[in-house]
Amino acid sequence: MNAPLSRNWDSLRQSRRDRLARAASQDFARAVPADRIVDLLEAVILPGDRVCLEGNNQKQADFLAESLADCDPARLNNLQMVQSVLALPSHVDLFERGLASRLDFSFSGPQGGRLAKLVQERRIEIGAIHTYLELFGRYFMDLTPNVALIAAQAADAEGNLYLGPNTEDTPAIVEATAFKGGIVIAQVNERLDKLPRVDIPADWVDFTVQAPHPNYIEPLFTRDPAQITEVQVLMAMMAIKGIYAEYGVTRLNHGIGFDTAAIELLLPTYAAELGLKGKICTHWALNPHPTLIPAIESGFVESVHSFGSEVGMEAYVAARSDVFFTGADGSMRSNRAFCQTAGLYACDMFIGSTLQMDLAGNSSTATLGRIAGFGGAPNMGSDPHGRRHVSPAWLKAGREAGGANAVRGRKLVVQMVETFREHMAPVFVEELDAWKLQAAMGAELPPIMIYGDDVSHVVTEEGIANLLLCRTPEEREQAIRGVAGYTAVGLGRDRRTVENLRDRGIIRRPQDLGIDPRMASRDLLAARSVKDLVRWSDGLYAPPARFRNW
Amino acid sequence: MEILTFEYPSAPLALAGQPALCGVVGSGNLEILIRAGERPDYCRIRIHTSARGFGEIWQAVIGEFAAGNAAGGTEIAINDMGATPAIVSLRLVQTLAEYAGERQ
Amino acid sequence: MKRDFNLRRSWFEASARARLAGLLDAGSGKELLPPAAAEPSPHLAALGLPGAFDDGVVVGSGRLAGRPVLFAAQEGQFMGGGVGEIHGAKIVGLLRRALREGPDAVLLLLDSGGVRLHEANAGLIAISEIMRAVLAVRAAGIPVIGLIGGSCGAFGGMGIVAKLCSHLVISEEGRLALSGPEVIETVAGVEEFDARDRALVWRVTGGKHRFLMGDCQAFVDDDPAAFRAAVEALLAESPVDVDELAQLRRQQAALTQRLAVFGQCRDGLEVWQALGVAAPENVPMLDARALVSLKEGLSA
């Protein structure tokens, strides 16, 4: 038998004590003045630390990000950044200024181009590109932060935090950091004597700093109904009649985009006419999309749990607490980790859009010269093999794929695309740009958003392809070609096979669904402008200035 | 700009109506004008498009339209500002229906 | 459905022809130079751009509440409603026809950023001809009524044409000004005017502001039926008013006064406050009826 290991078992706690002592020796109390934040960061962060910088595609700890980028690289360097989204210029500055060297993340959005350049110059080491759930999971495994820099709406004198409607990632980050000897620093928009509610208790938070400006929030989920096209209305009609109604989809998630916004706006009109109220779309894992307001007001929607909030929807959400998750104070409580879990395991359907799809149904939004990542989409758009509970939609899909004796159901993963994007870029391609990107970046795998074998249906203006019913890879390919319109992939179809697939109901045209394309009019949309949405909300929705024309 | 001209056999349209116009020449959109043509079993199409190099796709879209609809005896003029094939197909059937006197 | 929005047609969204269909007595509209008889702009063709059969404006005659009218409706979706040579000639020709035919009114459905830059010289001349023709029609005792509610508003030369009309009907979505927001931002900087702040743009150029300032005589919902009702009401008042010199002098004095009172304001909100509106921040959410009664309260 080996001798018991002789070691110090509380080095993390000791390190934490040392860091707090250094801060105390510089006269830092729990409430830190904004003009001394750089000194605090330099006091409590050590070179080589793993630092979690809160920021998502919605709210951002932007003041702390800028302050960290202003630290002295001679004192702070080799930081290992873990963060959901690399979105702000300051996030990339950390690497360009030599403060940080390694990055584990989920999504890079607008900084994708700068990030790709840093990778090619070997000035940044990317650990991995994750989904949100994977990254949160690793916070509790091998990527636990030493220091977390987070964003909250308000703090009280003790340091309790109110996160406001945009709770988002904060609970997951703080939980991982505070209970593994880490330091939690929160930027807050305001200090209050009494918080509306406590989202994070003070003893999980070490320091708070009131930022000079409220933290940035991107209104990412607002789609102006004025921009929805007739073709999107047509595809939405097909999806509702050919998929939502057929499978009786009640629990679902929608991607961001005009295609799915069109579906949301057809629920009170077209879907209601088909008698589908109460039969589809009752329970959602979804951010508070403004385009969902008419469906909610029409009584379609029973429940919505959200990843985050949406700018301008606060008062509406608070006034519809039967539908949304809200605190005793009335304001929304979102939670990205839980909502992603709901999207993965409790939804019968995901429907979203993509920029490219190949002949196997693999899809990607990655474009050359950018490293973007996919955030939550791969979790939403995948069939979880860990699911065991049954629902009619899940069972029907499972039996279509595996026959009457199938031992498992299937999640419906629907990709909805117009065959050509703007500037006549074909969506259907022989080879995804993701492969070229993989070669250029020296990555292990091509950045694929949704794997083809998870996709159950493809909806285009030409029709719906049900991939569950395809029995061979060749059939799958022809089913995809058969709805790929006038793209080269579509023109390359085998006409006889495609007609055979149509006879078997694997491909269905608008006519097969009893839909006359000429009926696809914007007049079917329950709201045709942002102003209409405000009217539907009884004036409770307050859209950001850029979405208004009044 | 590119000017394309096609002529396809198509089943004769029973009655020739007043000229019909659908759509607007806006970004990603097009206008289509259908009026009576000379040959009863042919459909003639002339396209002005802002997007160059998509002649093959136009040919496929128009060919399918002429084969799938009774559009013989018509002359179709199109002014296009980069509409996708989906929009083109939709506008063609809309305009033809109006020309044939169908009320939507 | 809780609220029936589908019966509501939007003027803002509608094409020029759809607006006319909602404005005129059913079936009464007759186009002059319809698409099948017209030629697209040769200037655009020379630049390698596709034209429109009607060059972006529909002209003709029809009836409104039984009264004969002539109309010109600009199509804002084509080249921003820009006035080119043919486009302008069609409007001028229509106005001259009014002198000959003597309709009860000429309706100008404005939706234009001004001159079409691709044919700028011809467009500039056309706009000055339109201005002159509008004044000639008014001098003949025929009211020219401008209707503003399209996506391009009435800017540049067409903003001036709008102000030469006998009467203007505007919706909240409509905008009326000389220089467009992007032009001001480009010339004077984003500190002077942030063209991307759409709410600000509408507070400064939008229909509500124009109506509160007295620049437009009628304020209506974004609905062809509402525009129709407003024109019908104006026609019933037989609204012929020729600008006499004394009246022009009074207007000039009022504008000078206006500059003195509001010249330092940075935002429509400040102007409305100075006008005596109790809660200016609520103005953007008022419906048409509420705004009209607010205005009546101010004048009282």
Image (cartoon, coloured by chain):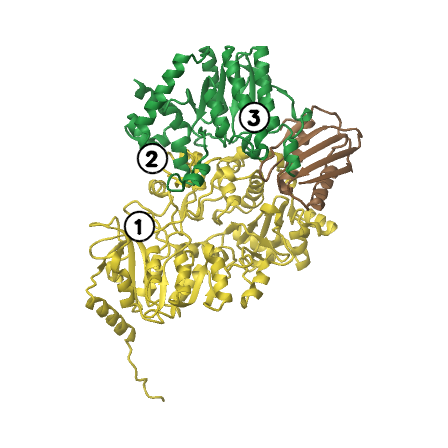
Quickly name the residue at label 1. A213
**Residue A338 circle label:** none
Q: Which chain is green?
A: C
Q: Is residue A271 visible?
A: yes
> Would you say the residues marked 1 and 2 are in contact, meaning their CB atoms lie under 8 Å apart?
no
The C terminus of chain A sits in image quarter:
top left
Q: Using the numbered discs, state the Cα–Cα distance from disc 1 to disc 2 in whole angstroms.
A: 23 Å
Mark 3 surroundings within 10 Å by alpha-carbon count, few (fewer than 14), some (14 through 19), many (20 or more): some
Say which residue appears at 52% left-offset and 37% top-offset: A275
CA gap, disc 3 to disc 2?
34 Å
On-image quarter of the N terminus of chain A = bottom left
> In the image, which is nearer the foreground, mark 1 or mark 3?
3
Residue at position x 37%, y 54% in the image: A60
| Kind of residue at disc 3 | Ile
Indicate which disc, 3 or 2, sits on the residue closer to the N terminus.
3
Q: In yellow, which chain?
A: A
As rendered, which of A397 and A160 lies closer to the eye? A160
According to the picture, the residue beneath numbered tag 2 turns out to be C266
Tell me, yes or no, whether dots 1 and 2 are on the same chain: no
Whole-angstrom CA distance, mark 1 to mark 3, is 51 Å
Is residue A373 in view from this perspective? no
Q: Nearer the viewer, residue B4 or A314?
A: B4
The residue identified by callout 3 is C125
Relative image position of residue C152 (x, y in whole percent) = 50, 32
- Chain B palette colour: brown
